[in-house]
Structures are given as C-alpha cells and as structure tokens.
Image: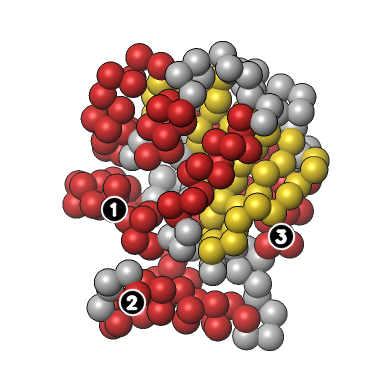
Amino acid sequence: MNSHSAFNSSDAVARYAEGPKRNVPGHSGLLPMTRILLAERVPAEGRVLVVGAGGGLELEDLALAHPGWRIHGVDPSAPMLDLAAQRLGPLTSRVALHEGYVQDAPEGPFDGATCLLTFHFVPPDQRLPTAREIHRRLKPGAPFVVAHLSVEDGEGQRETWMKRYAAFLVSSGSDPKQAAATSEKVQKELAILSPAQDEAILREAGFSGVQLFYVGFTFRGWVAYA
C-alpha cells in the first residue's frame, strides 16, 4: 500500500477538509451511514480501527457520536495525521494516531473497522493483502465498512460514468475544463476496479455477508463481517 503523493503536499493537506464534500457524491450521508453500520455490532466501549485516517474527518465523526469508543487511526502521510490531530483537538485523548500502513496498526482485536475513500489509492496487487491485514485484526463477526471509487468497466460504462463524475464536479463549482482534467487524472493515476472485483477481494480476504449500502455515481460502499 503506497502513500499517494497528493497527501504529502502542504497545499493538498490544507485543502483536504473541503475536498470530500465537494468531490464525492453523497459524502454528507456517508459518514453517518458508516457509524450506524458500525454501531450495530460495536459495543459502547468498543475499539475501532480506521485505515486511511489522515485528515481526521472520519475520526472526528466517530469520536463525537460515540464517546465510549477507543479509535485507532493509521495513515502513511505524516502531514495528514498532523491535520487530523489539529482537527480532533481535545478528542485526541480517545484517538491514537499511527503513521504507516495497516501492517503498522495495532494487532487488535478490534470491534470494527473502516476504510473510506482510500482503497482506490492502493495498487491492485496490494488490495487483497491489505484487506486480509484488516480482517485478521478484527474480532469474529466485527463489521468492516469500506467505500471508494468503483466503476463498471463493460461496454463503455466506465467512460460514461466518469463523464457523469466530471459533470458532478462542475455542479459542485469546478470549472468545466478543470473537472474534465480531474476525471482524466483519476482514470490515469488510480487503478479503479469494478464492483464485482471489489466484492471478490472482500470475500477472498475472509469477509462474509458483503452488502452494498452506498452508491454515489462512481463511488460505492460496502459493509462486510469478519
């Protein structure tokens, strides 16, 4: 799992907090849905692992909603973890930050885990090992909530959906040329798998009960159980 260069630039880090809200369709609902799915099985004093935690949006949301949860966030970008610490403020007493990849996270076992808007930065050959590392840190039956870019690739569907994504960026205030360039860059730099491939990785990693809970144009989210 490689650190994406975008998250090691000071400018990108400074602009991060607004990015998901502007660039991810349905992002305002993704965080509450994530904590609802976790809370179905994570106890009041449970431990939650957040993979790709830099920036702190997810950490803050979980910590505010569940004061009894002890949260561990892992991310390879030190600047993003610094931003997370700033965002969390006094909440940092219940959140432990770990620089590195999931292999560097505590062994657990955890009562639940999340990986939001991160897997599309992981090279395809490292996605199954990453999912397995998350799985082995979870208690049996613990929920894992994951969401990222995932697009059908048959009969021109990918091209159609990426054009729709560019149109969404324009609707969020981006210049049309910049939106088209962003869509092209995403396709060129990120290895976006199909939903079927993403679900197969979860199952091969040992997860069961894989359920789709979120679709936002080119983004999809699943909950699965260890």
Circle number at residue 197 = 3
Q: Are discs 1 and 3 less than 8 Å apart at CB?
A: no
Q: Could you tell me how far apart the alpha carbons at marks 1 and 2 are, in whole angstroms?
A: 15 Å
The CA distance from mark 2 to mark 3 is: 29 Å
Q: Nearer the viewer, residue 84 or 31?
A: 31
Name the residue located 37 percent from the left edge and 39 percent from the top edge. 57
Tell me if residue 170 comes above or below residue 156 in the rendering: above
Residue under pointer 2:
170
Q: Which badge, 1 or 2, is on the more N-terminal residue?
A: 1
Looking at the rendered structure, the kind of residue marked 1 is Glu
Residue 108 in view of the camera: yes
> What residue would you read off at disc 1?
18
Q: Circles 2 and 3: CB distance less than 8 Å? A: no
Q: Residue furthest bottom?
A: 155
Q: Quadrant of residue 157?
A: bottom right
Q: Looking at the picture, how far across and down is residue 163, in whole percent?
A: 47, 81
Within the image, what quadrant is residue 197 found in? bottom right
